[in-house]
Image (cartoon, rainbow, N blue to C red):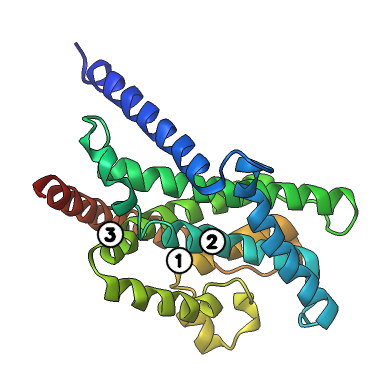
Amino acid sequence: MSATASVMPSAKSQARVIGALLMREILTRFGRHNIGFMWLFVEPMMFTSGVLILWTSLGLHSARLPMVGFTLSGYATVLVWRNAINRCGDAVEPNRALMHHRNVRVIDLFAARIILEIAGATISFLILALGLTLTGLMSGPDDVLKMIFAWLLLAWFSFDMALIIGSVTALSESAARMWHVLSYLFLPLSGAFFMVAWLPRYAQNLVIWIPTVSCTELLREGLFGVGVMAHYKLTYLVVVNIALLLPGLLLIRYIAARVEGE
């Protein structure tokens, strides 16, 4: 039997486990009443729409880029990394009883929550972008493939960071409080509120090393096309994503050993 043939049954089994955990998470968080699981993407849509209305009404955006597209693309990226990371801090404790099942592993608990948050942010972004485009409030994207690539890179980075920070905060309540503060400090540096080209040269040379900045710049280049001068480091971003995955998996393995030992 080939290695691929032996791995496939295990992969299918774990996919079913993650699928079941996804459904359980949806029912636990949103219930069966009112609009139920639709809150998964309605909630981030409401948040993004509120910020969009606020920025537009107050005229806080003075650049030449279209206000609607700029705001939507910025806050959509924030929702991906922020929600994915924040939801993983308590992924283990509420689900300890599930660890008695042979096929349920700690990595499955994290993966289910990360997938759920990224899916919610993605659906809300697509619905808002489509609705704003159809109503004429936003121009259609210039390069959809470039936007998809940027989104996938951002999702990958968010997955890695969710494993790392989620594991650390699960181990330490102090770390959880520290991340809560650091996430707000990171927000203005994430690339959501500026284009790299708007900054002084010395600032450009610094912020370009922040992974989320490259993701957001690439996303906006795909959205606006020649209307922006985007700056990003794709090779660096891929290397960072690969490098962050290893410590994330090692931390998950450490948590799994602690849970099984208790």
Do the residues bearing badges 2 and 1 touch, measured as CB atoms within 8 Å? yes
Where is residue 234 drawn, in percent x and y?
47, 59
Identify the disc placed on residue 215: 2
Q: Amino acid at mark 3?
A: Ser
Q: Amino acid at mark 1?
A: Pro
In-front residue for pair 170/125: 170
N-term mark: 2 or 3: 3
Q: Amino acid at mark 2?
A: Cys
Do the residues bearing badges 3 and 1 touch, measured as CB atoms within 8 Å? no
Where is residue 200 drawn, in percent x and y?
58, 88
In-front residue for pair 119/229: 119
Do the residues bearing badges 2 and 3 touch, measured as CB atoms within 8 Å? no
In-front residue for pair 55/91: 91
The quadrant in which residue 4 appears is top left
N-term mark: 3 or 1: 3
Instruction: For mark 3, give the secondary structure.
Output: helix
Instruction: For mark 1, give the secondary structure.
Output: helix
Dot 2 surroundings within 10 Å: few (below 14), some, or many (20 or more)? many
Q: Measure the alpha-carbon separation of dots 2 and 1.
A: 7 Å
Provide the residue designation for mark 3.
Answer: 167
Residue that lies at the very extreme toward the left in this rendered image: 261
Q: Residue at left 44%, top 49%? A: 114
Residue that lies at the very extreme toward the front in this rendered image: 33
Looking at the rendering, in which quadrant would you find the N terminus? top left
Q: Is residue 141 visible?
A: no
Identify the disc placed on residue 211: 1
Q: Measure the alpha-carbon separation of dots 3 and 1.
A: 20 Å
Q: Residue at left 21%, top 56%? A: 251
